[in-house]
Amino acid sequence: MTNETTMPDPCAAAFSVLAFILKAHGLKAEDTTDDADGQGLTPEEQEDQLVRAYLHQRERNRTRGRPEGAEEPDIPASEAAPPPPDRPTPAVPDGKDVNAPDTARAFADPDTKDREAAAPPTAVAKPDSAERPERPGTGPQASPVPSVPPERVSLPNARAKTPYIAPPLKGYFDLRMRNDNGTGLVLGADGSLSAESMQAGEYTIDLSGLKDGRRVSVRARLSVIPRPEDLWTSEPSDQNAPLAKPDEAFEQIEGEAFLVAASTRGRSHAREGAYRDDHFALSYDADSGWHVMVVADGAGSARFSREGSRVACETACRALKTLLPEEVDPVAQTMVQSIEDSHPGNDVPAPVVNTLMQTARMAAQALERRAQELECPAAYLSTTLAIAAAKKVKHQWLLLSFSVGDGGIGLWDGAAGAAVLMCRPDSGEFAGQTRFLTLGELDHPHGGASRVFVEIRDSFTAFMAMTDGITDPKFETDAALANPDRWRTFWEDDLTKAVTFARDNTIIKEQFLEWMEFWSRGNHDDRTLAVMVPNTPAPAAEGTGESS
Amino acid sequence: MRRLPIYLLLDTSASMSGEPINAVQNGLNLLISTLRQDPYALETAFLSVITFDTEARQIVPLTEITDFQTPDIQARGVTALGDALRTAAQCINTEVQKSSAQVKGDWKPLVFLMTDGLPTDDWKPALQEYRVARPGLTVCCAAGPGVDTAVLSEISDTVVTLDTADSSTISAFFKWVSASITVSSRKIDLTKDDAIGGDLPLPPAGISLIKT
């Protein structure tokens, strides 16, 4: 039913004139009340309504600089779909009322459009509702108008569970949030979007804003990316399978120094329920006074490397127990004396080199024997090896080291601010190349005495041996490993902030293992760290010689 | 942290119009959403997109997975394969960190090159430049029967061919690329060595792996 047909006769002529004028200006009869068709209105009311609509339309066209008669794409969602066949289909088929941001109707995604379209149209008359066109076929100008799809923008990606702020959207004024789609994003006064914490996922945020003087809808796409920390899972390894190894280990030993070591499984192994490939061994021999720390990193690509690192550590530790007193002790006094007399020798004494080389050779031989027992190639047991040994000789500490492969051995003397790198970096020219403990490697010209290091000092803060699971994240490069500042940072600002290296620390195990879990992006290797701290002379009450 | 740089060289010449280019666009979306769920890739892989038609452009610089946003791509023009190789070489030279005593460099980049036609420019000198940039592993993909695999075989030892350049096969290719990146980022983590061709997963049906 149209307005014309319901109109009483006496008003018909006047109304026709009005309608003609309106039509010439591209205006249609508007529904300003629930009674959209004007039924029940007196002729005077209908006329008044038409005139107001006309004036409003003219005003609007004037302020927007648009030619009168140009149509506004003001179609509520419920009326926009489906587009009439005689109109061009919008590029994005989810036309919405882009110029009526105050209506309660939310913008619909294409996939939620049907639900939106089925919702009843907003019933409450709004101040701008006079702008709404009438439904097709109910006015002087019946053709519907195309809808304007929302303007699409992409927000910078967010990280899950991480505070987020996106800079203000460019090109829009007076932005308003219409639907944050559960993200909790808040629109700031400056147009920025922020959230304290969001869940990972893909989101669409509906906003509106002023652009070129018109209110337009803006659909912002936001990807909230999971944190890698949350994607790592941990499966215990099978402790009943052959060659099983506990997923973590901790040990402490008291001698003339305090020895502590921990080894934990890397995230990449934990994720697959694989074994820890690292290993360590500590010993203190009260009879000889030698402290020994051995750490080894089984090659990630080698099938039984967890066994290789164990065999290497235990063999080396056992061998040193005999070799150090037999071979090194006879020259130890002379070595220390030469330091005290300020006549340090240039060369490492042959017995020291021989002892450490012989130890490494025995460990390499043990790997070969073990491979034969397991009926597998020796390469299946590939491992690195790092040995740190120390003994108090007279008033001096005699410190020895040897290593094959990456990882690190360092001596930190906090009082002097000095760090001594006691290993030769074995990383190759290219990232990732490392050497493993084999007889061939030890016999190679570059594999001999240059791997042996000796230090003699009257005091030190900490003597440390570690696998690359520690050196990679904490030192990164060989240059950093040789930099005293990095050792100071590592010891003073990092490790001892979390772990108190004292014999009477009853929670040192918990502290140490918790520190070992530090987060470092891209570093998921097994981690092993052995630390030797000399007994502080102050509390002196404690004797030495606790059996290990 | 040592990054695993991934370069995607995508042919956006006019012959890719329609279904193929849409499939590539969808493939990029699929690729990135897959990698976002993999902790190895999320931490180490960095992604760059270079498109080539009448000329090559790096439309996304080397970007970490977390920040990567899928670009919009359009098909037009001819197939400047040589310019693509030259652009890739320049990007690798400027973006990929080399190892030194002070800096532990990035892993060698993985390059995935996809084309559906014959090169229309002089690509051989560009190939020399590309080789000098020392990419780690290059995988060439011949999308459909119109591709001269002899050309691609000169670029890389690893060439895959798509039986057809339809959306399902292109989608399968991108899935395979995702798997290759995931496997490679995991492999470098475990072995601390650069990824090589032998580490790639087996391609699915519709994609043939040619080793030359």
Image: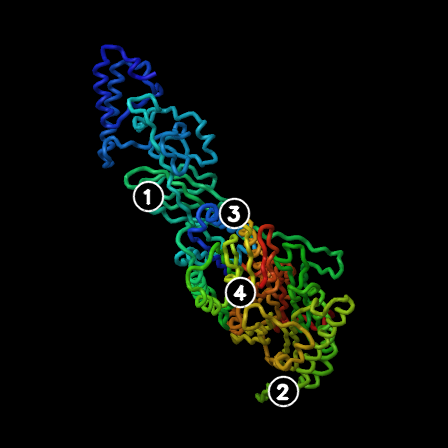
Disc 2 marks a residue whose amino acid type is: Gln
Q: CA distance from mark 2 to mark 4?
A: 54 Å
Local secondary structure at mark 3: loop
Q: In the structure shown, which secondary structural element does the residue marked by tag 1 occupy?
A: loop
Which of the two discs, 1 and 3, sits closer to the camera? 3
Query: In the image, is residue B123 above or below residue A195?
Result: below
Residue type pointed to by label 4: Gly
Mark 1 or 2 closer to N-term? 1
Say which residue label 4 marks: B136
Q: How many marks?
A: 4
Whole-Å distance between the Cαs marked 1 and 2? Answer: 80 Å
Identified at 37% across, 41% down, the residue is A151
| Residue labelled with disc 2 | A337
The residue type indicated by label 1 comes to Tyr
Residue ID for mark 3: B166
Q: Residues within 10 Å of mark 2 (few under 14, many from 20)?
A: some
The residue carrying mark 1 is A172
Identify residue type, mark 3. Answer: Asp
Quick check: marks 1 and 2 in contact, CB under 8 Å?
A: no
**Quadrant of image for the N terminus of chain A:** top left
Q: CA distance from mark 4 to mark 3?
A: 29 Å
- Where is residue A384 shown, x and y percent of the image? 65, 70
Front position among marks 3 and 2: 3
Residue B79: image quadrant is bottom left
Viewer-side residue, A101 vs A53 = A53
Q: Are marks 1 and 2 on the same chain?
A: yes
* Distance between the alpha carbons at the discs numbered 4 and 1: 45 Å
Quarter assignment of residue A440: bottom right
